[in-house]
Amino acid sequence: MLTKKGKYGLKAMAHLARFAPGHCVPVSEIATTQHIPKKFLDAILCELRNCGYVASKMGKGGGYTLARPADEIMIGDIIRALDGPLAPLPCASRSSYRPCDDCSDVARCAVRMVMQEAQQALSKVLDNCTLAQACTTAMTIPLCYEI
């Protein structure tokens, strides 16, 4: 399951993607418009900066901007940066595999097999969707419908 940290990070990145490259957006603006606690957002943006997804500028006119174009940032990578592996269990992870303590036969574990399938399906979607695509999709959904 996506943590609040991961969800808030995605919301902040999507907000930044709406602006021209290099345009700095204050943390307070992101926090207010996206309904994210500011202190928590500060920590999330710091992690995203350390991972190279956002850049920051101090002082007047400062804030955060995307460090590279939104069409070069994959949703799966953002989630992994903030939440770790996408796999629901460590034994189903390709990048951070750890056997379960209570499993006697990893090769025949039904739970592991199902979780690996779930992980692969999730990865297929999240690793093939850029931040730009996610934002474009969100903007094309009609806000009202005819009845």
Image (tube, rainbow, N blue to C red):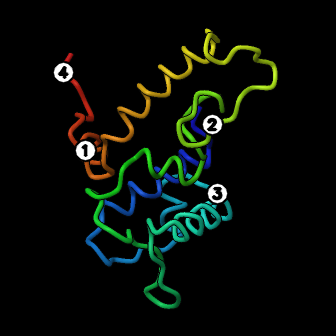
Residue that carries the numbered disc 1 in the rendered image: 139
Q: Is disc 1 surrounded by few (<14), some (14 to 19) or many (20+) residues within 10 Å?
A: few
The amino acid pointed to by label 1 is: Met
Side of 73 relative to 108 (left or right): left
State yes or no: discs 3 and 1 in contact (Cβ < 8 Å): no
Front position among marks 4 and 2:
2
Separation of disc 1 and disc 4 at Cα? 18 Å
Side of 73 relative to 76 (left or right): left
Quadrant that contains the C terminus: top left
Residue that carries the numbered disc 4 in the rendered image: 146
Q: How many labels sit on residues?
A: 4
Q: Position of residue 57 (x, y in %)?
A: 47, 84
Residue that carries the numbered disc 2 in the rendered image: 97
The amino acid pointed to by label 3 is: Pro
Mark 4 residue element? loop
Give the mark nearer the N terminus: 3 vs 2: 3
The amino acid pointed to by label 2 is: Tyr
Mark 2 residue element? loop
